[in-house]
Amino acid sequence: MLPSKQQASAIMLPSKQQASTIMLPSTQQASSIMLPSKQQASSIMLPSKQQASTIMLPSKQQASTIMLPSKQQASSIMLPSKQQASTIMLPSKQQASTIMLPSKQQASSIMLPSKQQASTIMLPSKQQASTIMLPSKQQASTIMLPSKQQASSIMLPSKQQASTIMLPSKQQASTIMLPSKQQASSIMLPSKQQASTIMLPSKQQASSIMLPSKQQASTIMLPSKQQTSSIMLPSKQHATSESEM
């Protein structure tokens, strides 16, 4: 279904396409949707005032749902081969967001609420059961989850600015929660990290946390009004617990 005032839209559905639903509402401009071969049960909904959006769903895509609400600009979503049960929801006033989900992605859920700007989310190969939630007024956040990531949960509440979270390979059961008014925080968790929990409460500024390789069962809690804290835990650290009140 293509409503009124549609301009320069390109929709390509190759061979062996089954049960696909594409809805493009009014005032749609320069949208490009490409669904390659062996696409099944895909649903794509693009509401009003959508501009310059690019959605590419390669081969062997199953049960994917992509919803882009009103006033979406310059968004790019790429879902490569063997993608299953992925859900991507981008609410209103989303600008310059890039979401890339490479091969063998399963059961991933990404939710980006209102007033999201310049966010980059990259989930490489063999990602399973990851949940990423970025609430309102999120700016310049970068989240990178490399290969063999399992059961990771990242929650970034309101008024988050310039946060960088990098989780390298073989990361399991990590939980990172950054509450409101977090600024310039950098969290890096290298390879073979297991069962780490990091909680940074409100009014946290310029904190740097680095957990090198072979870190297990570490808990770091930084309460409110914490400034310029630096925590570095080198390799082969076991069962550390740090709390600053």
Image (cartoon, rainbow, N blue to C red):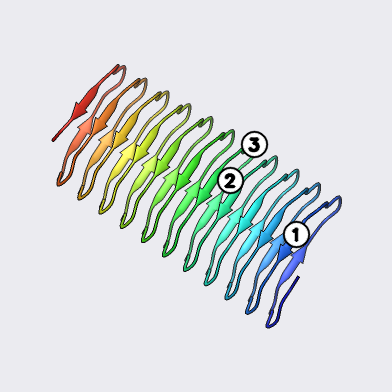
| Residue furthest bottom in the image | 5
Residue found 43% across the figure and 60% down from its top: 118
Whether 87 is drawn above or below 45: the answer is: above
Locate residue 62, reporting x and y percent.
Answer: 73, 44
Residue 104's disc is 3
Locate residue 105, reporting x and y percent.
Answer: 61, 38
Whether 229 is drawn above or below 237: the answer is: below
**Front tag of 1 and 3:** 1
Whether 224 is drawn above or below 113: the answer is: above
Q: Residue 196, located in which quarter of the rendered image?
A: top left
Name the foreground residue: 222 vs 83.
222
Q: Which residue is mark 2?
A: 101
Q: Which residue is mark 1?
A: 21
Identified by mark 1, the residue type is Thr
Residue found 71% across the figure and 77% down from its top: 3
Image quarter of the C terminus: top left
Identified by mark 3, the residue type is Lys
Identified by mark 2, the residue type is Leu
Residue found 56% across the figure and 49% down from its top: 100
Q: Residues within 10 Å of mark 1 (few under 14, many from 20)?
A: few
Distance of label 3 from label 2 (alpha carbons): 9 Å
- Mark 1 vs 3, N-terminal side: 1
Image quarter of the N terminus: bottom right
Name the foreground residue: 79 vs 131.
131
- Mark 2 vs 1, N-terminal side: 1
Distance of label 2 from label 1 (alpha carbons): 21 Å
Q: Residues within 10 Å of mark 2 (few under 14, many from 20)?
A: many
Q: Secondary structure at mark 3?
A: loop
